[in-house]
Image (tube, grey):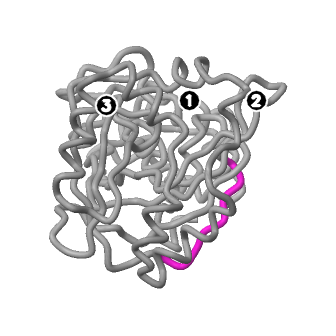
Amino acid sequence: MVIPHLVETERAYAKVNLYLDVLSKRDDGYHNIVGLFQTIDLYDLIEFHMTDEPGKITIQTHANIMGMNLIEKAYRIASEYYKIDFGLKVRLFKNIPMGSGLGGGSADAAATIRFLARILNMSDEAMMQIAERVGSDVPFLLRGGTALVEGKGEKITFLEPITGYSLNLFCSQVSISTALMYQKLTEDMYNKGPKPVEELYEAYRIADLHGVRSLSYNIFQKMVCAEHAEVKNNLDKAWTENPIIAMMTGTGSCVFSVHRTGGRYKFIAGSPNSL
């Protein structure tokens, strides 16, 4: 029985890519990646209001989102697997900049799947299946924390959390299309990052700061900085803080600087009960 006044709230945490390389292009049009992903304590807040209008979803937000919101996409795909006898009114309080490489839209979708999983008693397998169809970063963000991510984003090895670090963000008004950046990759750019990525993870774990700096990598950083002066300027600005490492996350446009102390946003562990 639907309870129209029921309201549940989810936090959708942002992520940074401590390492991101592309190994090859797949036959299905996606790319095989390898990355070290980490969630941070910056989040969108989402309120889910259940209604008695099955199939209807409305999203109220101050953000200017083009096309189908990934919250709605998650709801639509979930409805292909489960009989959802309620609609949703969603209030999205957007704190994660869009087009920033921080995974905000994917985090919102993951939060929606977690909410639906509680209501519909989904299995972990079903959650993951839905997440994979919504977007490449969504499977990792179902749980978050620290993880080695491979394939097109669906092969996830959750690791013991990296702790004792924080970061600052340098985000511009530039919104960068992830799809476009992947389209610009050429074969000679693939598989150039230091290997194996597990060595970077271990460097973080034992506070080998030289190792962290030498092993960090983002395949897109050079290309994006060449095309967008604002991103390059933010990277230069981040380095003035004397961080352990300063780099771009994802396909941009946000840059982050990692510190042992003093950063605004902390690395956060995932939620084992989320998946």
Quadrant where the C terminus lies?
bottom right
Disc 1 residue crowd, few under 14, some 14–19, many 20+, Cα 10 Å: some
- Assess whether residue 79 is covered by the magenta stretch: no
**Residue located farthest toward the right when viewing the structure as drawn:** 27
Q: What numbered label is drawn on residue 76?
A: 1
Residue 49 is left or right of residue 54, and the answer is left
- Please give the residue where the numbered disc 2 appears in the rendered image: 25
Residue 112 appears in the picture as rendered: yes
Quarter holding residue 264: bottom left
Residue drawn at (44%, 20%) of the image? 68
Disc 2 residue crowd, few under 14, some 14–19, many 20+, Cα 10 Å: some
- Please give the residue where the numbered disc 3 appears in the rendered image: 98
Residue drawn at (37%, 48%) of the image? 247
Secondary structure category for the residue under label 1? helix
Disc 3 residue crowd, few under 14, some 14–19, many 20+, Cα 10 Å: many
Query: Which callout, 3 or 2, points at the residue further toward the start of the chain?
Result: 2
**Residue located farthest toward the bottom when viewing the structure as drawn:** 206
Q: Which span of residues is magenta-colored?
A: 154-161
In this view, 37 is above or below 32: below
